[in-house]
């Protein structure tokens, strides 16, 4: 299969709403806080492989449910995960199934993070 042009890939991410450019300030603080937490990183890594409910995550990672809930809320608020599906248990309880968000995130130091200038820079970078 021929290698895809990195410029096409980056432009495609922007068109699909999968490119998020954040200045190092307000909104990026939640993201940085979530990524600096070891439990959140384990959750994010696991959800990157497979969508799971809180109960399944708790069991897979051997984390107490209340600790897991705190971290899931932080990851959801920072935009790193989302509720992919809602199912119902046999007892009639709502079960949320979480998944990692497919999004390229760029943190930009400085007050102005202009997505178009960041996109130009990303397009000029060679593919790794």
Image (cartoon, helix red, strand yellow):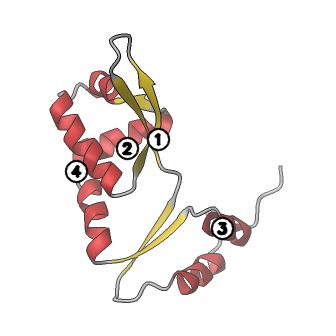
Q: Splitting the image into 4 quarters, where does residue 22 fall?
A: bottom left
| Residue 83: % across, % down | 43, 41
- 117 relative to 98, above or below: below
Q: If you read the primary sequence from the N terminus, does the residue marked by circle 4 or circle 1 appear first?
A: 4
Does the residue at mark 1 contact the one at mark 2 (Cβ under 8 Å)?
yes
The answer for how far apart the CA atoms under marks 3 and 2 are is 24 Å
Taking depth in this image into account, of 64 and 125 the one nearest to the observer is 64
Q: How busy is the neighbourhood of tag 1: few (under 14 within 10 Å), some, or many (20 plus)?
A: some
Q: What mark, if any, has residue 127 been given in the picture?
A: none
- 79 relative to 26, above or below: above
Taking depth in this image into account, of 49 and 97 the one nearest to the observer is 97
- 68 relative to 93, above or below: below
Q: What mark, if any, has residue 15 been given in the picture?
A: 3
- 63 relative to 9, above or below: above
Residue behind mark 1: 48
The answer for how far apart the CA atoms under marks 4 and 3 are is 31 Å
Residue behind mark 4: 37
The answer for how far apart the CA atoms under marks 4 and 1 are is 16 Å
Q: What residue is rendered at 43% in x and 38% in y?
A: 47
| Residue 38: % across, % down | 23, 46
Q: How busy is the neighbourhood of tag 4: few (under 14 within 10 Å), some, or many (20 plus)?
A: few
Does the residue at mark 4 contact the one at mark 3 (Cβ under 8 Å)?
no
Q: How busy is the neighbourhood of tag 3: few (under 14 within 10 Å), some, or many (20 plus)?
A: few
Q: What residue is rendered at 75% in x and 67% in y?
A: 5
Q: If you read the primary sequence from the N terminus, does the residue marked by circle 4 or circle 3 appear first?
A: 3
The answer for how far apart the CA atoms under marks 1 and 3 are is 22 Å
Residue behind mark 2: 44
Q: Secondary structure at mark 2?
A: helix
Q: Nearer the viewer, mark 4 or mark 3?
A: 3
Taking depth in this image into account, of 120 and 1 the one nearest to the observer is 120
């Amino acid at each position: 299969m021929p290698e895809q042009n990195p410029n096409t890939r980056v432009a495609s991410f922007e068109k699909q709403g999968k490119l998020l450019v954040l200045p190092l300030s307000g909104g990026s603080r939640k993201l940085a806080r979530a990524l600096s937490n070891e439990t959140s990183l384990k959750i994010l890594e696991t959800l990157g492989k497979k969508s799971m409910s809180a109960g399944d995550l708790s069991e897979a990672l051997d984390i107490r449910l209340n600790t897991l809930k705190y971290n899931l809320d932080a990851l959801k608020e920072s935009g790193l995960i989302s509720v992919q599906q809602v199912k119902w248990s046999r007892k009639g309880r709502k079960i949320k199934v979480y998944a990692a968000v497919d999004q390229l995130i760029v943190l930009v130091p400085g007050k102005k993070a202009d997505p178009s200038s960041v996109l130009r820079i990303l397009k000029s970078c060679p593919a790794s």
